[in-house]
Image: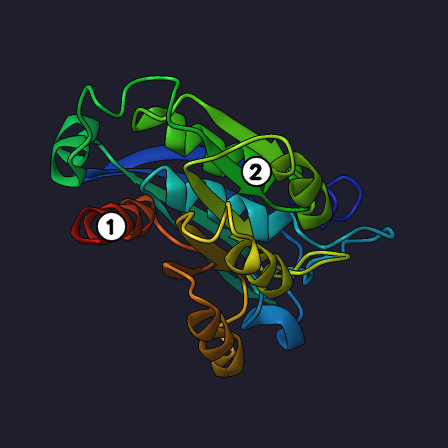
Amino acid sequence: NAVEASSQGSKVVVALDEIKNENRILIHNRGIVPDEIKDSFFENHTTFGKGEREGVGTYISKLIVMIMGGNISFTSDDSSGTTLTITFPKEYNRAEQLQELGINEKNQNDSFRILVVDDYAMMRRLIAGFLKDVGYRNVVKLESADEAVKYLQTETVNLIVSDYDMPGMNGLEFLKYVRNHSKLSKTPFVMITGRSDQHIVTSALGLGVNQYIVKPFTAEILEKKLRRVFECSLVD
């Protein structure tokens, strides 16, 4: 993106430094982020670049950084160009996070199957990779709710993590299908979406969603949501 936004003959500078307890990556180019998209720079379908693309580059970049425990931001003006800043903590203690979530040998097996449904391949890989990091190796990834419905006709899962905004059957319709199906109705369901519209949240809760996450989210948020799902399952 930085190269594409730069004029011919100009440079893109990538630098790495450290400040206190953080490592920092800086990417600078002479291009300017238009004022009309500055507030939504990291949102989905915003940065389309110079070609006919989907505009998900900066959005996916932010998801990757956040899931890795970092932060991403930018500054842009006519005099100095654009600088993208990515920071990561020097120490990322995964062991402590697993202990807090309650991951143990009971979870570290292939019998607990999680179905991840999202129309973006990168998002599917990110969620599935994170779940595997915390001990859930049996993760099935599908790109649409319609595919998920066909899959669930012959297969069983222990948890569903689904996006809301998908072509064809959306997340709410998929959730309704699951809750109305006698064999699937008790399956824990976590909905992930880039939209925080109150009517979507209300509808999802009314249909019996177990947890609801608005993108972009941190790894800690996903862990806490999963913990709440499992705690409620134990109570039930």
Q: Quadrant of the N terminus?
A: top right
The answer to whether residue 22 is visible is: yes
Q: Gap between marks 2 and 1, in whole Å?
A: 19 Å
Residue 39: name its quadrant.
bottom right
Q: Measured from the top left, where is residue 60 in percent x and y?
A: 57, 46
The image's mark for residue 224 is: 1
**Residue at image location 33% in from the left, 48% down from the top:** 222
In this rendering, the answer to whether 199 lies above or below 148 is below
**Residue at image location 47% in from the left, 38% down from the top:** 127
Q: Measured from the top left, where is residue 208 in percent x and y?
A: 42, 65
Whichever of callouts 2 and 1 sits on the residue coming sooner in the sequence is 2
Which secondary structure, mark 1? helix
The answer to whether residue 29 is visible is: no
Q: Measured from the top left, where is residue 197 in percent x and y?
A: 52, 78
Q: In this rendered view, identify the residue nearer to me: 192 or 216.
A: 192
Q: Which amino acid, mark 1?
A: Lys
Q: In this figure, which residue is indicated by the disc labeled 2?
A: 124
